[in-house]
């Protein structure tokens, strides 16, 4: 096909072939038309000649058949017609011969013209066939295209016709679209065009479309040097103008004011929204009158701050249509002036302020919550946290205020050992961060190393980000564990209780019971199955319930509708002889618990103890009567004996013989010992009866110690003992019963003198500690074994040892009783062979005396 060769010769041959075919088609069309016209003209004459020949040929045959007859007028007419037809045929033949000669002459001329055409085609070929030019020819509107010439290889234009005509494959999309539309108009409406196109490789091509002789021609020329540069500038200008028109159309469709200024600051162009904002008729009116949308102060500020490198961008307040409006103004400076736009942010500012107030309110609310909350933004950085969150993780404020990412937060917790250690930290972290790609909230259960259990909820936001809520379940889990354990322990405990337990629901049906309950009432496990109604249980217990009175009362209480649910207690005696203490205790949810305690043994013991107590009470009364009676009966004779003994010793009764004096001394000593014992017994009986009262007075401790030492002088001399009194600091005065204090010290000294070895020293030390008097008696006796120390204060408790005599064993008991009456305490320290030390601490009784006087 023409145009598909590779060299200049092939391109020239293709151009020649195109023009030869075009000229041949023209010649054949003209020659065929003339031949058809000649045939149409000679056809009638030929037909007449043929008819005449056929008629004259038929006449001899008719004559031979005897049909000859003289020629009539009709025959003459026919003959004349035949002669005329023959003449016309001869004339036509002559004309045809002349026309053929003429055609041969014209054919020679046509061949000469064809040779001339070949010559001209050769000359045109040199002009048309060039490496920088290509021509596409269409024969009519529906004919195929023929291509002549080539374009440079670097342009990227395909060589094949089909691929070349697919303009979108090697031209830039916008250029291909423009060319296809122009070609369609050229072939359909003969509309010529001149276009500058751009190939996909960036080269500039000029396309010219023309129509000639019913054919459509498009010439593609690759531009070079200045023409290419000029075409590129033209194309760039077209693009800029097109882009400017498109941009201005777009800006006019915006509802935000847009303007452009000259270098001197005057308005050069505004959009419709600007004109509407300044209440101008149109854009020209706004530019002509120089109507400004911004105040003078704002414009001066923009001119002062805007530079080529830094545009002005800030929120500006102005008045539009009488209302205060907030614009976000952006103005940039260029070489030929500046351009700016104003975005109405009034509603946005109002919404932002409302959102800010709402966020502050929510932040204040969340900050006072006990539940830790943290909010991460769409970039997974910490945006908000409350105080509970900071306390939970114990993170410093600078770290949290630095807005760490969620990954940094998790890594920090892991580094500080505050997160659970999973098998795979990577999987744990990826699962935690998957909330940002999730639609539904993601729950996590974290068991922290410090023993806390957290229920973590991560909820993704529709606009990005997530809210993390950390619910501390430690107490809940602990309570559930303890509750479950308690239920198990309770079940085991109830089953192993000796007391019978039964729980009834609000509907009167048995919830649970233990084996003790069934054993006490003599019923089977099936009769006390859970869900049994109280009437069935009462019927099963009827053999043990005397007259059924107990269970009637139980049923009435459990199934009653009394709002005041009180505990009912009652003692029941069963037909089997068992005595039960029953209690109906109200439980939550309108339930009742019935408990049955077997008190049979206790009742028997109680009755025995009651009888014994009565006997003891009578014995105690008898003892008291006996002590009082005996004390009185013994004290009176002893007093008389002692009185008469002292009288016998006095000179008034006269002199006694040595033997008599010895007997009188024995009588006096024994009587005094007996009187002391009787007095001790009487004092202890008084203390036990709780009727002894202290006679409180101010006691001089120094004088008390001197008086006790004087009274013990004779006793100590008898045993060759010495008494050493030690006073620590100032003893002063205390409030106490002086007679009882003296008894305490005398009892202690007498006990020490009984066990102290002859020639030893007994030490009596008095000291004071605040309002407490401390008396210490120490001897060098044999001491008390450790196993007997616990019983030294018991009554009538005597111990065999190295003592000089044995009393009734009441001395230390009386000491302890009198010290306790003074709200004091007594202690004893002793080791075998190391002596004994008894210490009494007696506080001053000012408060007691004040209450007594009051």
Image: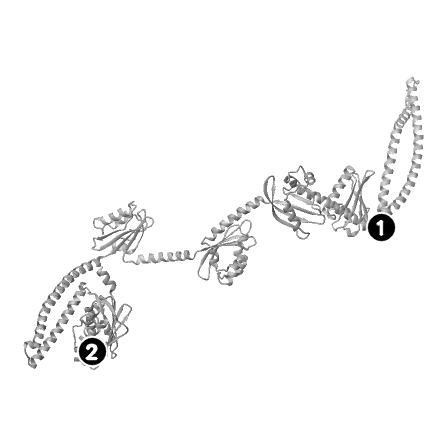
The first of marks 1 and 2 along the sequence is: 1
Kindly tell me whether residue 357 is visible in this rendering: yes
Residue 158: percent from left, percent from top: 77, 49
Indicate the colouring scheme. Answer: one colour
Q: Looking at the image, how many numbered discs can be counted on the residues?
A: 2
Give how far across and how far down residue 369 sits, in percent. Answer: 45, 53
Q: Residues within 10 Å of mark 1 (few under 14, many from 20)?
A: some
Image height of 576 relative to 240, above or below: below
Q: In the rendered view, does 216 fall on the left or right side of 450?
A: right
Foreground residue among 279 and 501? 279
Residue nearest the viewer, comparing 712 with 564: 712
Q: Residue 249: x percent and y percent? A: 68, 41
The residue most toward the left is 654
Position of residue 847 relative to residue 173, above or below, is below
* Of residues 212 and 821, the one drawn nearer to the viewer in this rendering: 821
Question: Residue 631: which numbered mark, if any?
Answer: none
Few, some or many residues within 10 Å of mark 2 (<14, 14–19, 20+): many
Q: Tell me the residue that label 1 is attached to.
A: 8
Apparent side of residue 488 relative to residue 142 in the rendered image (left or right)? left
Q: Which image quarter: residue 177?
A: top right
State left or right for residue 54 relative to residue 273: right
Q: Nearer the viewer, residue 45 or 680?
A: 680
Q: Secondary structure at mark 2?
A: helix
- Separation of residues labelled 1 and 2 (CA atoms): 156 Å
Quadrant for residue 622, please give it.
Answer: bottom left
* Label 1–label 2 contact, CB within 8 A: no
Which residue matches tag 2? 755
Identify which residue is drawn at 54% across, 47% down: 353
Q: State the SS at label 1.
A: helix
Q: Viewed as shown, does residue 464 lie left or right of 308?
A: left
Q: Position of residue 144 (x, y in %)?
A: 78, 42
């Amino acid at each position: 096909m023409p145009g598909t060769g590779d060299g200049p010769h092939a391109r020239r041959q293709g151009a020649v072939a195109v023009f030869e075919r075009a000229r041949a088609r023209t010649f054949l069309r003209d020659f065929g038309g003339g031949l058809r016209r000649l045939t149409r003209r000679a056809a009638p004459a030929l037909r007449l000649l043929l008819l005449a020949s056929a008629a004259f040929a038929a006449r001899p045959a008719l004559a031979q058949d005897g049909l000859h007859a003289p020629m009539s007028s009709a025959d003459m007419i026919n003959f004349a017609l035949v002669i005329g037809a023959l003449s016309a045929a001869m004339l036509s033949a002559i004309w045809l011969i002349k026309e053929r000669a003429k055609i041969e002459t014209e054919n020679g001329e046509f061949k000469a013209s064809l040779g001339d055409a070949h010559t001209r085609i050769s000359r045109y070929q040199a002009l048309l066939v060039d490496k920088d030019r290509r021509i596409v020819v269409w024969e009519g509107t529906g004919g195929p295209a023929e291509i002549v010439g080539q374009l440079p290889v670097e342009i990227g234009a395909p060589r094949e016709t089909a691929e070349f005509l697919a303009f979108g494959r090697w031209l830039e999309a916008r250029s291909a679209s423009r060319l296809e539309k122009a070609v369609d108009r050229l072939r359909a409406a003969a509309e010529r065009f001149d276009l500058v196109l751009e190939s996909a490789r960036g080269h500039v091509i000029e396309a010219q479309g023309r129509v000639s002789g019913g054919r459509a021609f498009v010439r593609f020329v690759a531009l070079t040097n200045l023409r290419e540069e000029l075409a590129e500038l033209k194309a760039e200008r077209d693009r800029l103008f097109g882009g400017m028109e498109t941009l201005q159309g777009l800006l006019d469709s915006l509802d935000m004011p847009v303007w452009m200024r000259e270098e001197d600051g005057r308005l050069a162009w505004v959009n419709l929204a600007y004109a509407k904002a300044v209440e101008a008729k149109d854009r020209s009116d706004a530019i002509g009158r120089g109507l400004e949308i911004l105040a003078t102060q704002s414009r001066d500020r923009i001119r002062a701050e805007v530079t080529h490198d830094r545009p002005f961008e800030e929120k500006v307040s102005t008045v539009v249509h009488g209302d205060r409006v907030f614009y976000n103004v952006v103005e940039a400076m260029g070489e030929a002036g500046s351009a700016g736009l104003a975005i109405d942010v009034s509603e946005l500012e109002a919404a932002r302020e409302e959102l800010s107030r709402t966020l502050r309110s929510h932040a204040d609310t969340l900050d006072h919550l006990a539940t830790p909350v943290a909010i991460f933004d769409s970039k997974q950085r910490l945006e908000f946290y409350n105080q509970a969150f900071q306390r939970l993780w114990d993170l410093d404020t600078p770290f949290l205020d630095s807005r760490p990412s969620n990954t940094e937060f998790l890594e920090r917790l892991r580094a500080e050992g505050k997160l659970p250690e999973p098998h795979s930290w990577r999987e744990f972290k990826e699962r935690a961060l998957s909330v940002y790609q999730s639609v539904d909230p993601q729950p996590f259960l974290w068991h922290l190393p410090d023993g806390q259990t957290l229920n973590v909820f991560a909820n993704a936001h529709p606009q990005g980000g997530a809210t993390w809520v950390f619910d501390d379940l430690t107490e809940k889990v602990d309570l559930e564990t303890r509750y479950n354990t308690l239920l198990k322990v309770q079940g085991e405990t109830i089953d192993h209780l000796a007391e019978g337990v039964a729980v009834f629901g609000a509907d009167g049906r048995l919830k649970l019971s233990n084996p003790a309950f069934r054993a006490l009432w003599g019923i089977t496990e099936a009769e006390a199955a859970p869900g049994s109604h109280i009437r069935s249980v009462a019927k099963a217990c009827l053999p043990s319930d005397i007259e059924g009175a107990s269970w009637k009362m139980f049923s009435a209480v459990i199934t009653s509708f009394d709002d005041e649910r009180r505990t009912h207690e009652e003692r029941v005696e069963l037909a089997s002889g068992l005595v039960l203490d029953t209690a109906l205790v109200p439980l939550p949810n309108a339930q009742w618990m019935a408990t049955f305690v077997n008190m049979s043994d206790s009742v028997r013991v109680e009755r025995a103890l009651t009888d014994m107590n009565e006997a003891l009470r009578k014995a105690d009364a008898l003892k008291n009567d006996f002590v009082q009676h005996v004390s009185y009966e013994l004290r009176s004779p002893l007093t008389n004996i002692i009185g008469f003994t002292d009288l016998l010793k006095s000179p008034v009764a006269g002199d006694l013989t040595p033997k008599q004096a010895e007997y009188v001394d024995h009588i006096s000593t024994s009587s005094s010992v007996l009187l002391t014992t009787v007095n001790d017994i009487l004092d202890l009986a008084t203390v036990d009866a709780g009727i002894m009262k202290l006679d409180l007075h101010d006691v001089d401790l120094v004088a008390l110690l001197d008086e006790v030492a004087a009274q013990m002088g004779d006793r100590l001399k008898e045993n060759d003992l010495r008494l050493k009194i030690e006073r620590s600091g100032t003893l002063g005065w205390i409030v106490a019963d002086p007679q009882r204090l003296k008894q305490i010290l005398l009892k202690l000294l007498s006990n020490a003198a009984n066990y102290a070895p002859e020639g030893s020293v007994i030490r009596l030390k008095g000291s004071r500690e605040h309002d407490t008097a401390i008396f210490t008696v120490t001897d060098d006796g044999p001491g008390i074994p450790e196993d007997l120390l616990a019983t030294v204060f018991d009554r009538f408790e005597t111990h065999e040892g190295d003592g000089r005599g044995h009393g009734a064993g009441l001395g230390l008991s009386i000491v302890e009783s009198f010290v306790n009456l003074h709200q004091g305490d007594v202690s004893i320290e002793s080791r075998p062979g190391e002596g004994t030390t008894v210490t009494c601490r007696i506080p001053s009784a000012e408060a007691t005396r004040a209450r007594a006087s009051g």
